Amino acid sequence: MTRITIEVNGLEVGGNTHQNLLEQLESAGVQPEYQCRSGLCGACRCKLNHGSVTQGDAMAFVMPGEILACQSAPQTDISITFDYQPATVKKQVNEA
């Protein structure tokens, strides 16, 4: 598993190359909009500023330079921008 950096609307979070972007953002406490999680609705559409992703099949329309977070897995460090500021939640750390 390769560790990478995901920059989303100026916030940096850690990521990997095997999980889709939507799941990774949610795990990091970032809450982008979504509806279907299967590439049909386009609610998780964002702009890919730099880096590369593999994108699965999707029915939703995306413009050049856009990706669907639910269908994209980062392959390198990436920078993405949503047209809105996604909500964030603090992740609790359990200390033993």
Image: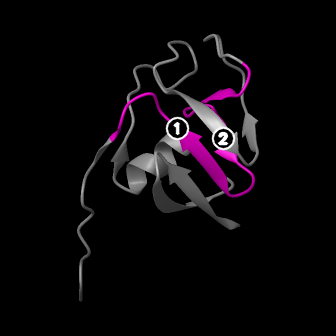
Residue range highlighted in magenta: 64-86
Give the image's coloring scheme: one colour
- Image point 41% across, 26% down: which residue? 34
Quarter of the rendering containing residue 62: top right
Residue 96 part of the magenta-drawn span:
no
CA neighbours of label 1 inside 10 A, class few (<14), some (14 to 19), many (20+): some
Query: Hey, what amino acid is under mark 1?
Result: Thr
Residue at 35% x, 37% y: name it: 85
Residue 79 colored in magenta in the image: yes
Secondary structure under badge 1? strand
| Image side of residue 17 versus residue 82, left or right | right
The label on residue 81 is: 1
Q: Position of residue 42 (x, y in %)?
A: 52, 17
| Residue 66 found in image quarter | top right
Name the residue that disc number 2 marks.
Answer: 49
Question: Looking at the image, is 69 positioned above or below residue 90?
Answer: above
**Of the pair 19 and 64, the residue shown nearer to us:** 64
Give the mark nearest the N terminus, 1 or 2. Answer: 2
| Percent coordinates x, y for residue 26 in the rendering | 40, 47
Q: Does 19 sit left or right of 36 as displayed? A: right
Quarter of the image that includes the N terminus: bottom right
- Quick check: 75 above or below 93? above
Query: Alpha-carbon distance for marks 1 and 2?
Result: 7 Å
Q: For residue 91, what is the image quadrant?
A: bottom left
At label 2, the amino acid type is Asn
Is residue 19 in sight in this rendering?
Answer: no
